[in-house]
Image (spheres, helix red, strand yellow):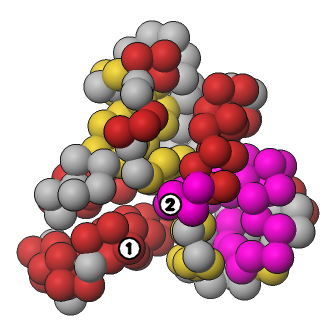
Amino acid sequence: MKKAVLFLATGFEETEALGTLDILRRAGIPTETVSVTGKKEVAGAHNITVLSDKLFEDVDFSEIDVLVLPGGMPGTKNLNAHEGLKNQLKAFAQKGKQVAAICAAPIVLGGLQLLKNKKATTYPGCEPELIGAKITGESVVVDGNIITGKGPGVVFDFALQLVEEIAGKHTRDKVAKDLLLS
């Protein structure tokens, strides 16, 4: 089974991070939270503090298949300021490994030119920062190995699409049914 990491930076959007994490784990997808702050405790945009599983510097990325970026402000700006994370995003994209970002977080991918000539979506107002992307305005967009989501209100759709991409439609349908989303 593919393994995923979900990154946490100070000011992350709690709904997007925890909702996605919960759904991936319900699907049986090994997923760890990784702090880019240098501390395991990370405060979200709405003052909910989460204890991450690991620190960025302790992750062996050769064992990871999927990178997930929740949005939120200033969380997205803090993710974008982390050079190690940006290097991993570029490496994953070049290898065809899956990269997912929701809400404002696709701007990190846009700044790295990872969305060039790809369909993508983002939080309204962030579109100019998705450099080279074909903005769809849809709730969730998959283009090759890149998955983007529009914002906190579509976290279930975003996370279930991730489940489908990682573990298949059958697993997605089962998790959706268990969540009363079918």
Which residues make up the magenta segment? 95-122
Q: Could you say which quadrant of the image residue 124 lies in?
A: bottom right
Give the residue at x 54% y 23%: 36
* CA separation in Å, label 1 and label 2: 9 Å
Q: Is residue 178 left or right of residue 163?
A: left
Which is more N-terminal, label 2 or label 1? Answer: 2
Give the residue at x 83% y 68%: 116
Q: Is residue 103 magenta-colored?
A: yes
Q: Is residue 92 left or right of residue 22?
A: right
Q: Is residue 153 visible?
A: yes
Place of residue 95 in the rendered image (x, y in percent of width and height, measured from the top left) = 59, 55
Place of residue 22 in the rendered image (x, y in percent of width and height, measured from the top left) = 24, 52
Q: Which residue is mark 1?
A: 165
User: Which residue is situated farthest in the bottom direction here?
Assistant: 182
| Label 1 SS | helix
Q: In the rendering, which numbered label is found on residue 107? A: none
Position of 129 relative to 112 (above/below): below
Give the residue at x 51% y 58%: 97
User: Which residue is situated farthest in the top direction here?
Assistant: 39
Place of residue 114 in the rendered image (x, y in percent of width and height, measured from the top left) = 75, 59
Identify residue type, mark 2. Answer: Gln
Position of 45 relative to 117 (above/below): above
Location of the N terminus by quadrant is: bottom left
